[in-house]
Structures are given as C-alpha cells and as structure tokens.
Image: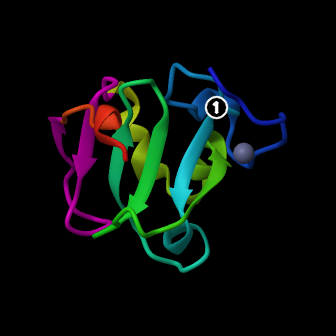
Amino acid sequence: MDTVEEHPHSFLPGAWPFSEPINRLAYISVRALHGGDPVLQVFHDHDGDWQLLHGGATDEDDCKIICLGCAYERDSSIGILSGLPAGWAAYRESPDGPWRCEPYEDDDSEED
Ligand SMILES: [Zn+2]
C-alpha cells in the first residue's frame, strides 16, 4: 500500500473513518484540488487506490497525489465512503447529494 510522508491534519485522530492509514496515497483531479470543484466521483480502484474526481472527469483531466487524510480534511463527506469495497465507485449529483455506489469493471487491461 502506498503512503505519503506523515504530516499533521486538523481533524482529531478519533474522527478518522477509514480503516486505512491517514497518510494513504490517493489521487485527486486538479480541478477538485485547485479549481474548487467538489468531488462528485470516487473510485476505489481494483488495486486498492482511491481516486477522487470532480463531476464529469475524463482521462484528459490531470490528477495529483494527495493523502487520504488531506482529502478527508478538505471534504469530510467522503468519510461515509470508508466502507466502499475495492472495485466500486461512488457518484453524487451535488456535494450535498446522496452517494450512489456500484461496482465497475477493471479496465486496466484495456490501456493502449
Ligand atoms: Zn495529508
């Protein structure tokens, strides 16, 4: 499991909802990280990685590495997805909307 260097976060350790380390490496789309777009799509990859994307993200969108703790710090509403199994994705229409979760195909084998 990939992690980033440990660093402080503003939430209390007891508030951490995920079973994974707080400094677990995750990917976040640049528009969600710097553009102020809310995270509307979350992928828990088949290999265990987390991807946090703004709505309508495509392969063209750049992703940056973030730590899961920083992602949670930015938007604690992703905490409810801590039980999302690997190979599942979650979507919502708006930052206040309910998450809709479903498994998705592993398309790593289709990379060209
Ligand atoms: Zn962090």
Is 91 magenta? The answer is yes
What residue appears at the point 52 percent right and 78 percent down from the top-left corner?
Answer: 36
What residue appears at the point 54 percent right and 80 percent down from the top-left corner?
Answer: 35
Q: Is residue 12 above or below residue 74?
A: above
The amino acid type found where label 1 is placed reads Arg
**Ligand 1 under 8 Å from disc 1 Cβ:** no
Q: Is residue 48 left or right of residue 20?
A: left
Q: Is residue 102 above or below residue 47?
A: below
Q: Around disc 1, counting alpha carbons within 10 Å, would you say few (fewer than 14), some (14 to 19), or many (20 or more)?
A: many
Ligand 1 image position (quadrant): top right
Magenta residues, start to end: 84-103
The front one of 78 and 65 is 65
Q: Secondary structure at mark 1?
A: loop
What residue appears at the point 28 percent right and 70 percent down from the top-left corner?
Answer: 56
Q: Position of residue 42 (x, y in %)?
A: 35, 48
Quadrant for residue 82, please give it.
Answer: top left
What residue appears at the point 31 percent right and 29 percent down from the top-left corner?
Answer: 84
Q: Which residue is mark 1?
A: 24
**Residue that lies at the very extreme toward the front in this rendered image:** 112
Quadrant for residue 104, please give it.
Answer: top left
Q: Position of residue 108 (x, y in %)?
A: 35, 35
The front one of 2 and 101 is 2
How are the residues colored?
Answer: rainbow
Is 44 magenta? The answer is no
